[in-house]
Amino acid sequence: MLMGLGALFGIDFLAKHFFLVNFLANALIVGALYGILWSIFLILKNKERFVKIFKSSMKNKRVALAKKIVLALFAILILLGVITPDAFIRLMSLYLAIVLVLTFYLWIAVKAVENSCMLKYVKPQQLTEGDWIAKDVRVSGKYITGPKDLGIEKKKIRKLIELYRKGKVRKILIKEGIPFVPSFFIAYIITLAYGNLVLLVI
């Protein structure tokens, strides 16, 4: 898409008006908001499963330990914010305390969204080049494909279809991503209409 935009506007336009720089800045902002909204949509669509996985994640021993550490640091930062006479340190302590807790729960929520909403089983015939395989596929102990491939190739898809016809492979677990193409289009329109959102806010 970026190559297409470069071909459409030309180097002179990009150099004079910083269009590409503004577009990339807007794409980051719009992409983040788009990702959050898409995640909320997925949570609402798979509410029961999400809640179940979120709760089970919180019961995990490592997560429980991390939670205790986060809450301890939160308490220390809040205490520091209360007792310190310096206004800047007080503000930064309270800010860090809130960010720390929010980041922890956001991390758990993101993992829960991934496990509850973005994993699904498909037949080899339904695979397309670039699909992210979420779990190793082995036949008679031999590795066929898996997460480390960073996107499945056509050659391996044909191999899986062949194994499926022989009854050696049934369904493949894949990880679906967020379709970010609309966010690029939105960022493009915003860049044309308003320029750089960061500079606009400042």
Image (spheres, helix red, strand yellow):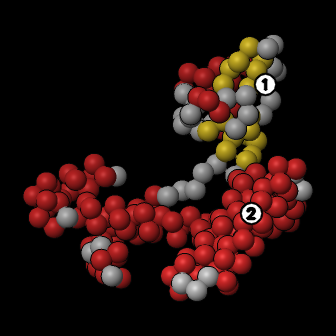
The first of marks 1 and 2 along the sequence is 2
Disc assigned to residue 169 = 1
Q: Which image quadrant for residue 13?
A: bottom left
Total marks drawn?
Answer: 2
Q: Is residue 7 left or right of residue 183?
A: left
Q: Residue at x 46, y 58 (%)?
A: 181
Of residues 7 and 13, the one nearer the viewer is 13
Of residues 174 and 68, the one nearer the viewer is 68
Q: Residue at x 28, y 66 (%)?
A: 22
- Give the CA distance from mark 1 to mark 2: 43 Å
Under circle 1, the secondary element is loop
Q: Quadrant of the C terminus?
A: bottom left
Q: Is residue 160 above or below residue 15?
A: above
Q: Is residue 104 above or below residue 175?
A: below
Disc assigned to residue 70 = 2
Regarding residue 91, the answer to whether it shows in the image is no
Comparing labels 1 and 2, the label whose residue is closer to the camera: 2
- For label 1, the crowd category at 10 Å Cα-Cα, with few meaning under 14, some 14 to 19 and many 20 or more, is some
| Residue 131 in picture, x, y percent from top left | 59, 39
Q: Is residue 156 above or below residue 151?
A: above
Under circle 2, the secondary element is helix
**Three-letter amino acid code of the residue under disc 2:** Val
| Residue 121 in picture, x, y percent from top left | 76, 41
Q: Which image quadrant for residue 37?
A: bottom right
| Residue 64 in picture, x, y percent from top left | 85, 56
Q: Is residue 22 left or right of residue 179?
A: left
**Three-letter amino acid code of the residue under disc 1:** Val
